[in-house]
Image (cartoon, rainbow, N blue to C red):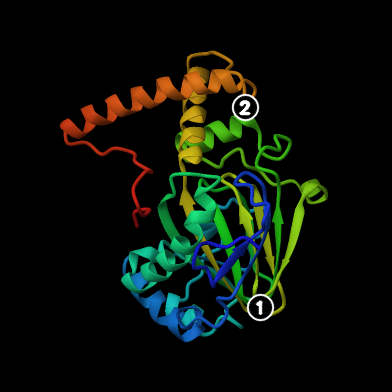
């Protein structure tokens, strides 16, 4: 297994490829911050900051990921749900745990150890974040994609993680990628049951996990026991470049053009990335001068 210089927590495969789904192992199962009593207290702190996302176990693979909390609301508090997760019939995510000083140290400890090994193949780690998922038996995480590279680790219980190649355009189309990167919309990321035949499936148990590159389609089915899972996420130079290219193609499409898919012409992508980087930097400078907000995923940590 491939480790960072001092890593004693998470192992990547020796053939680690930043753009391929792959297995991970870890030794975080007994970490005191990842035990249920600690998570109940964290849930109280994050709920006060509205950094908790939850829905009932009525959500399915085909439920809109964005709308699941509205479609299937969990009426219990974060603390009540977490303390009674075995019978809560709920799915809960503790969002951006790096916003909590204690958990930020955990995020840094893990990613600092892995950073040398990751950056040997994928430079520019930034926008770090941590997400903790606590779910009742049988709960489902609906089908969706995310912007960040994701290292997902099973702490307690079991679950089945379905993943798909991030470049499989039968599962997530080029247009769906454009909308996602340009407008943060998953409207065209739509589940079909026949996708199961194309999936790489991980049977996760404590000590096991997976690495999912940016925009890897995925869906999760919890086992018959309560589950605790943690994800460590980050951006790199490559993820930011890819997002910029898709946003550029989205603009071309709004002008009535039909842009070439990202990756179809590496030479074109290099030129487009250079032009878009310059344009984005200039536009950002103007917005800052006017006191307006600027979209910046190059910060050290994802904002909460």
Circle 1 residues within 10 Å: few <14, some 14–19, many ≥20: many
Q: Where's residue 65, x and y in %? A: 57, 53
Question: Is residue 241 left or right of 62 when viewed as pictured?
Answer: left
Choose the circle earlier in sequence order: 2 or 1. 1
Mark linked to residue 157: 1
The CA span between labels 2 and 1 is: 39 Å
Towards the viewer: 267 or 213: 267
Mark linked to residue 87: none
What is the tally of numbered marks visible in this picture? 2
Answer yes or no: is residue 162 visible: yes
Towards the viewer: 119 or 300: 119
Q: Where's residue 208, x and y in %? A: 67, 69
**Can you identify the residue that label 2 sits on?**
263
Write the residue at 39% across / 81% down. Answer: 41
Quadrant of residue 275 within the rendered picture: top left
Write the residue at 34% across / 41% down. Answer: 296
Write the residue at 61% across / 83% down. Answer: 86
Towards the viewer: 141 or 128: 128
Element class at badge 1: loop
Q: Is residue 213 above or below residue 5?
A: above
Q: Where's residue 184, x and y in %? A: 47, 41
């Amino acid at each position: 297994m491939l480790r960072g210089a001092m890593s004693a927590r998470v192992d990547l495969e020796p053939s680690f490829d930043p753009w391929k789904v792959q297995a991970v192992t870890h030794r975080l199962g007994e970490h005191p911050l990842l035990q249920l009593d600690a998570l109940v207290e964290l849930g109280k702190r994050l709920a006060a900051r509205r950094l908790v996302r939850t829905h009932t176990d009525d959500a399915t693979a085909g439920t809109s990921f964005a709308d699941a909390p509205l479609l299937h609301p969990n009426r219990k508090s974060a603390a009540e749900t977490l303390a009674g997760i075995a019978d809560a019939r709920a799915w809960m995510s503790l969002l951006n745990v790096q916003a909590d000083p204690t958990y930020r140290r955990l995020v840094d400890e893990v990613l600092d150890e892995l950073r040398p090994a990751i950056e040997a193949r994928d430079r520019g780690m930034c926008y770090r974040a941590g997400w903790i998922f606590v779910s009742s038996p049988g709960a489902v995480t609906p089908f969706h994609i995310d912007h960040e590279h994701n290292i997902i680790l099973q702490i307690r219980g079991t679950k089945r993680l379905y993943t798909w190649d991030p470049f499989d355009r039968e599962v997530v189309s080029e247009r769906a990628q454009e909308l996602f990167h340009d407008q943060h919309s998953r409207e065209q990321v739509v589940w079909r049951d026949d996708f199961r035949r194309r999936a790489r499936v991980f049977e996760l148990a404590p000590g096991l996990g997976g690495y999912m590159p940016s925009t890897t389609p995925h869906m999760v089915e919890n086992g018959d026991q309560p589950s605790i899972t943690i994800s460590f996420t980050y951006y790199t130079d490559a993820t930011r470049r890819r997002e910029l290219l898709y946003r550029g193609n989205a603009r071309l499409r709004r002008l009535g053009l039909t842009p070439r898919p990202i990756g179809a012409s590496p030479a074109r992508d290099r030129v487009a990335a250079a032009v878009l980087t310059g344009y984005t930097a200039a536009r950002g400078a103007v917005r800052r001068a006017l006191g307006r907000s600027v979209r910046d995923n190059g910060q050290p940590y994802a904002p909460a």
